[in-house]
Amino acid sequence: MLDVNNLKREFRSSSTTVTAVDDVSLSLGDGVFAAIVGKSGSGKSTLLSLLGTLDKPTSGTIRIDDEDVSKMSDRKLTAYRRDKIGFVFQSYNLIPNLSALQNVMLPMEFDGIARLERRKRAEQLLEQVGLTGEQQKRKPGRLSGGEQQRVAIARALANKPKLILADEPTGNLDTETGKVIFDLLHDLARSENTTILAVTHDTEIAGQTDRTFHLKDGKLL
C-alpha cells in the first residue's frame, strides 16, 4: 500500500546542506499500524510531511496505492490529499466554533458528499471512536483532550483514506489516555483496513504497534 524507496530530503543554503531524511526505504501493507520513533531532530516530522505530500523529496519515490505521488503536480496533490490521506495532529486542529459532528462532516462537504450522507457517516465514525449523543453536539472547548483527539481521528477517517498519518497523536495526553488512543488507532487500522503511520516519542507505546521504525539523523536504523 505504502512503498517508499531511497527517499531523501535536503535543505540547502548558500554555505551548507542539511540532509533531514537520508535514503529512507520502507513498505507497509493495507491495515497495518506502524510507528516511527526517534529523538527530536531525527527527521520524523520531515519524513511525515513527505509521506503526506506536504513537502516534496529531493530524490526518491513515494508510492501510495500504486500511485507515484512524488511526481504529481501541486493541483493533483491537493485532490489526492483530500481523498486518499488523513491527518491526525498533536494539537488536534479542530475548528473551535463547530461541533464535533460538524468537524467530522467538513471534509466530506469539500468532497461533494450530500448532507444527509455526511451526517450519517460522521455520526457512525464518532460512535466508532466512542463519542455518542450529547458529546457529538459539543464544540471542542467542551471536550477533554482525549475526546478532542477522538474527534480528530474520526475526521481523518471521513473520506475513507488509504493512509492516515499521525504526528505525535498522544503528545498532549496523559499516559493512560495516550494508550487508549493508540489502542483505538490499532483497532481502526483493522476495522477500516487503513494503513496508519504514527510518529511518537513514546517507545513503550510504539512497541505495541504492528511495526516500529527507528529514525536517527534522517536514517532508518
Image (cartoon, rainbow, N blue to C red):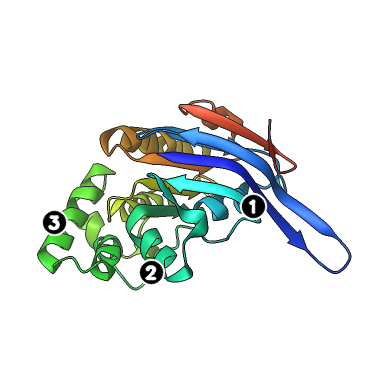
Amino acid type of the residue that numbered disc 1 sits on in the rendered structure: Ser
Res 112 → quadrant: bottom left
Say what secondary structure mark 2 lies in. Answer: loop
Of badges 1 and 2, the one in the foreground is 1
Gap in angstroms between the C-alphas marked 3 and 1: 42 Å
Amino acid type of the residue that numbered disc 2 sits on in the rendered structure: Ile
Amino acid type of the residue that numbered disc 3 sits on in the rendered structure: Lys
Q: In the displayed structure, would residue 64 be above or below residue 72?
A: above
What percent of the width, then of the height, locates residue 164? 41, 47
Res 28 → quadrant: top left
Task: Say whether residue 151 is left or right of residue 72.
Answer: left
- Which residue bears the numbered disc 3? 120
Say what secondary structure mark 3 lies in. Answer: helix
Q: In the displayed structure, would residue 96 be above or below residue 190?
A: below
Residue 133 in sight here: no
Task: Say whether residue 78 is left or right of residue 206.
Answer: left
- Which residue bears the numbered disc 1? 59
